[in-house]
Amino acid sequence: MLDMISVIIPTCNRPAAFLNKAIESAMVQSFPPHEVIVVDNCTVSIGHESLPGNVTVYRLPQRIGPSRARNFGAARASGTHFAFLDDDDWWDDNFLRNIWSVLHAEKSRCACGRLDTFRTNRIERFKCATPETLTIPLLLRRNPGTTGTNLLIEKKLFWEVGGFDERLRTSEDKALVLEILRADEKISIAPEAVAIMRQHDGVRAHQARRYKLLFSWKYRHLLGYKGLSRELFRLLNPRLLKKMSRKTGRIRRAECA
């Protein structure tokens, strides 16, 4: 079977300009995808007539969550590989070409690109995972630069690890990466494959504290008692933790004076 990439874009209540930018970035890739699928779970349906005719759109119940939307799109995709793109982000024109090249050169089933940010009309280099940072212990504590937007994954591997956890509405992309690593699969790094994450005033899913708690609880056996306690404290007492950090910083500066 010919290798093909299916691009899946879940969308929920984003400005049309954001969604159109994401779709356009997928359509103009120098290594064109096999198909582009938009999964719409907005409170008000997007204007399908304004989208390119070769984009497949599915309308689902309102606010079903990014994991369910992505899994739904994946279940209907016909490509051998999946690339997921958030509706407020976009790709460099050579994203698919560069990440595909690395995946095939290293004979891996999943690859991770670089993540840049866009704010105040400027693109800035943000994060790029490395073999040293893309590990289970580090992923449990923080994200070294992996998100749904900068991953390319083989279809078979995606379903082998269970796809996106539909109980999670944030950190679901980090959970997917964790499951790939737990399955002893290599994740190749493609620093020239650039995904751009838009910083804006709208609500991003990662702001939901409840789902961060669910992520920590899901991996409590990996975190251990101390690690779980630390994560719960950090999530339940962010203001206190920030205050303690400032106090600790003042004490250290005083010691060094």
Image (cartoon, helix red, strand yellow):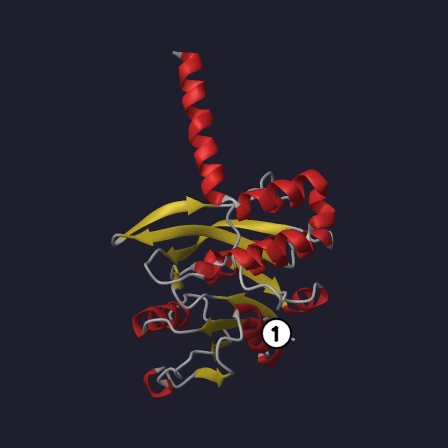
Residue at 56% across, 55% down: 212
Residue 187 vs 33, above or below: the answer is above
Whether residue 10 is visible: yes
Crowdedness near tag 1: few (<14), some (14–19) or many (≥20) residues, C-alpha within 10 Å: few
Whether residue 37 is visible: no
Residue at 51% across, 66% down: 84
In the image, farthest residue toward the left: 121
Residue 245 vs 4, above or below: the answer is above
Out of 129 and 239, give the one closest to the viewer.
Answer: 239
Q: Is residue 143 left or right of residue 176?
A: left
Residue 65 vs 220, above or below: the answer is below
Q: Which residue in the protein does label 1 denote?
A: 2
Q: Is residue 173 left or right of residue 227?
A: left
> Residue 38, percent across and down?
46, 77
> Residue 49, percent across and down?
34, 88
Residue at 30% across, 52% down: 119
- Amino acid carrying mark 1 in the image: Leu
Quarter of image, res 16: bottom left
Residue at 33% across, 58% down: 200
Instruction: For the N terminus, give its image quadrant.
Output: bottom right
Q: Secondary structure at mark 1?
A: loop
Q: Is residue 31 left or right of residue 180?
A: left
> Residue 10, percent across and down?
48, 72
Out of 30 and 201, give the one closest to the viewer.
Answer: 201
> Residue 165, percent across and down?
63, 65
Out of 189 and 2, give the one closest to the viewer.
Answer: 189
Out of 52 and 181, give the one closest to the viewer.
Answer: 181
